[in-house]
Image (cartoon, rainbow, N blue to C red):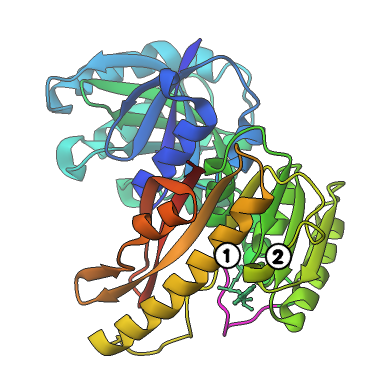
Amino acid sequence: MSLFAFELGRKKELCFAELVAVLGKSRIVERNLDTAIFELDKFDPTELQDKLGGTIKIVEIFHDIPHRGSCKPLENDIISFISKKFPELFQNYEGKLPFALSFLSFKNPGEIDTRKLLNFSKKILKSLGINCRFVNKNFSNTKPSTIYKARVIEKGIDLCLIKGIRDLFIGESIAIQDIDSYSLRDYDKPKKDARVGMLPPKLAQVMINLAGQNTKTIYDPFCGTGTVLIESMLMGKQGIGSDLEPRMVEFSEINCAWAKEQFRMESPFKIFQKDAQSLTKKDLPEKIDAVVTEGYLGKPISKIPDAKYQEFAFKELSNLHSNWLRNIHELTPKTCKVVMCVTAYKVGNNLIHLPNFAQLAKQAGYRVTETYTYDRDDQIVARDIKVLEKI
Ligand SMILES: C[S@@+](CC[C@H](N)C(=O)[O-])C[C@H]1O[C@@H](n2cnc3c(N)ncnc32)[C@H](O)[C@@H]1O
């Protein structure tokens, strides 16, 4: 077994929860500022990376040095490591290749002399006769998008220094998020609807992972443009969706057919029109392994809602959630989790959450086991991601 670091996306608690759901609690070594370290057997890095919506990149660790709080005194140890490791690391490389030095989990970016380390790396590589193109601009830290665009992982080396809780970990990136694929799934679907909003594909993936590891059939009763269905199919699962609006049913069908062709997927999908509050066994004859849905977030709003509006909207949403959760509880097996979004409003620096959701879920037969908030600076409506298990 070896150590691997997973660089967490923007909503770190949620991204970490996804990793724990996929890799298991017993494999965690530590969770530091930007990464989670796991001890794992060898795996296919691209395959794992592609299924993790919340991980930016995966780093294989090959060395660690205790740091006692600051990494500054370790510069000479890092330099000696570079001199020893580079001949082995670069032995199969020739021609001009990209090289990056990335720093993760450093609260204080000035803590390490990046210029000194980059210059030293350059010197060693020159002495080994290796012609490198340095990806770090002006001796500063790298951005994941730069590593991705320069194809550093395929063509060269992205050497990562990670400040752990007690150790400085040194390793090499072995996989990175496929930005182009996410952008295609996010923006190039044939049918989009700004009015209903769309779930980011990465968030849909995280939610599918939180719903369990052995799921084969995922159901989204508020499927909209089909984001959850497409991500389920990409993960090799069957996607079943329904929506109240015939127009959204058509959008989902067109988008799923497009994705199936675009990504050459075998997985089937099925979409039908129905109010999620009045589903019957006839609508869902299949065994549903998990319900994953963004759900209905309320009418689109363009200004911060006042207390009166919040009360009105939360009442409407509580009624809807209560009805559809009771309904779906009847139609799914005991092991079937529900992973859903619940509306929260951002008012100044505060988040106003839908009141008494746990009570509502309990009355519908569910226990809320996990809650994470997903918000963005430019959005008034935030999503509370809830994981529900049958009582
Ligand atoms: C926020 S959108 C879902 C967007 C979707 N996640 C996507 O990425 O495109 C909510 C959807 O719920 C649907 N909806 C609202 N009330 C419903 C109900 N009672 N039953 C089923 N669908 C409903 C709306 O038509 C809308 O398409």
Mark 1 lies within 8 Å of ligand 1 (Cβ measured) = yes
Residue drawn 63% across the image and 19% down it:
92
Mark 2 lies within 8 Å of ligand 1 (Cβ measured) = no
Range of magenta residues: 192-201
Relative horizontal placement of residue 37, taking residue 47 as reference (left or right): left
Q: Which one is earlier in the sequence, the residue at label 1 or at label 2? A: 2
Classed neighbour count for the residue bearing mark 1: other residues with Cα under 10 Å, few (<14), some (14–19), many (≥20): some
Name the residue that disc number 1 marks.
324
Kind of residue at disc 1: Trp
Kind of residue at disc 2: Leu
x and y percent of residue 129 in the render? 53, 23
Q: Main secondary structure of the magenta part?
A: loop
Mark 1: which secondary structure? Answer: helix
Residue sitting nearer the eye, 299 or 380: 299
Relative horizontal placement of residue 163, taking residue 153 as reference (left or right): left
Name the residue that disc number 2 marks.
279
x and y percent of residue 133 in the render? 50, 41
Quadrant hosting residue 162: top left
Residue sitting nearer the eye, 279 or 354: 279
| Number of numbered callouts drawn | 2
User: Does 85 appear above or below 298?
Assistant: above
User: Does 119 appear above or below 205?
Assistant: above
Q: Which quadrant does ligand 1 occupy?
A: bottom right
Q: Say if mark 1 contacts mark 2, CB within 8 Å.
A: yes
Residue drawn 32% across the image and 37% down it:
103
